[in-house]
Image (tube, grey):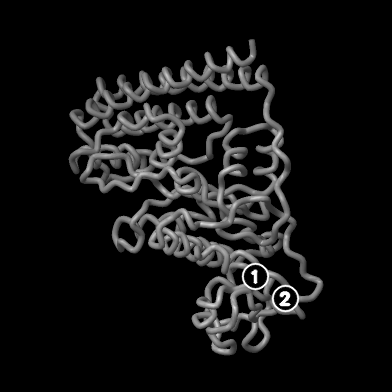
Amino acid sequence: MAFRPWLRRAKLKHGKLSFRLPARRMACCTSVVPANKRRGTEVPIPARQCWSWAACAQKDATMQRKYLTLPKSAQFPKILMDMRTDLDHLPPAKQRELERIVEVIFDEFRAATENATGSRKGARILKIVLFGSYARGDWVDAPLSANQYKSDYDILVIVSQKEMTDRATYWTKCEERLIRAYTIEKTLRTPVNFIVHSLHEVNDGLAHGRLFFMEIKKDGIALYEADDTELHTPKPKTPQQALQAAREYFDDGFPSAMKRFEIAKFDIERGYLKDAAFDMHQTAERLYSCLLLTLTFYAPYNHNIAFLRSLAEGLDRRMYSIWPEETRSERAMFQKLKEAYTKARYSKHYKITEEDLNWLSERVEELGRVVHEVCTDKIAELEMAAA
């Protein structure tokens, strides 16, 4: 049984927040109810013993003695969704990792908003959704030594207010903690990428036929939800609308990316190595965004090219072979490009050589070639559908 069912349903009963818990979870959450009670028993959760109650209650909760209670007039936000909730297709270790990720997201969100004032004081997480390969069931979990693509966990966090989507203000420490858990502490064996949107933004994306959000609604798995209200019904674009949008995104995005590539090459010739690294990063970011917009009509507001790369590689397998990862030095080169967005501009310790830049230039040029090929194939496919 996946962890998801015991986390999923929170509701108010007699003024207290209750969960529907599988019997095997009761022992770790309360000493009041015997662990051999039947599955589905409703249990009030003691405040100190389980992180998940706080995840569900968040800022609306008030503490009364040892139980978490809500005012009787309190209402959970009307959100989502006729979405899958099971994780039975994942190995137990993966299910435990996702449980840990949800915990980290809530912990860091609470820390980031604990001193909020005004309307932001009532901000909360409405839903956490797993999407991408781990939701569909076609993930790849190869070790780096095998020189193969390794799938990430792709997570969508839906919040109650648009202000809460500001990554720098509210989500930087969460991102750093998840990266540290994977790269240093090794408490996570799978890298994590997450995006944050308000409920309005998600519904707007569905209303405008953005394939990214439509795929999440179709294939996503709810790891946490405040209630079961459905999202807006998707309104797919007509073939003509889809073709027009794809052309506009490609005609704008691809030349913009390649212009930045020319600037990067100029920087290399003049010896402006840090500037060249930053412009090379911007080329890669714009190419990935161009592909995402052309194929799905959506790209996240995110400068993390590792995340953009992950989303792009999930759309077309031709994107896999661009960045070789057979050796540590090759993997380090992509990391150096990823860090260039900030460190090449602001850190005196950031170092990159002309040789490094020439290697990156070849890979970014290959990225441009593949993006052009994938996007033009997609536009040709849409032209046939619209004919």
C-alpha separation, residue under disc 1 versus residue under disc 2: 8 Å
- Residue 352 or 250: which is nearer the viewer? 250
Q: Residue at x 58, y 17 (%)?
A: 382
The front one of 330 and 34 is 34
Image coordinates for residue 123, horizontal then vertical, percent: 66, 60
Residue 167 in the image, given as x and y percentages of width and height: 52, 50
Pinpoint residue 233: horizontal percent, then vertical percent: 73, 40
Q: Are marks 1 and 2 in contact (CB under 8 Å)?
A: yes
User: What is the three-letter code of the residue carrying label 1?
Assistant: Ala
Q: Secondary structure at mark 1?
A: helix
Q: Is residue 53 left or right of 176 when viewed as pictured?
A: right
In the displayed structure image, the side of residue 209 where residue 308 appears, left or right:
left
Which residue is found at the position 45% from the left and 28% from the top? Answer: 286
Local SS, label 2: loop
Q: Which of the two discs, 1 and 2, labels the residue nearer the N terminus?
A: 1
Q: What residue is rendered at 59% in x and 75% in y? A: 39
Q: Dot 1 corresponds to which residue?
A: 57
Q: Amino acid at mark 2?
A: Leu
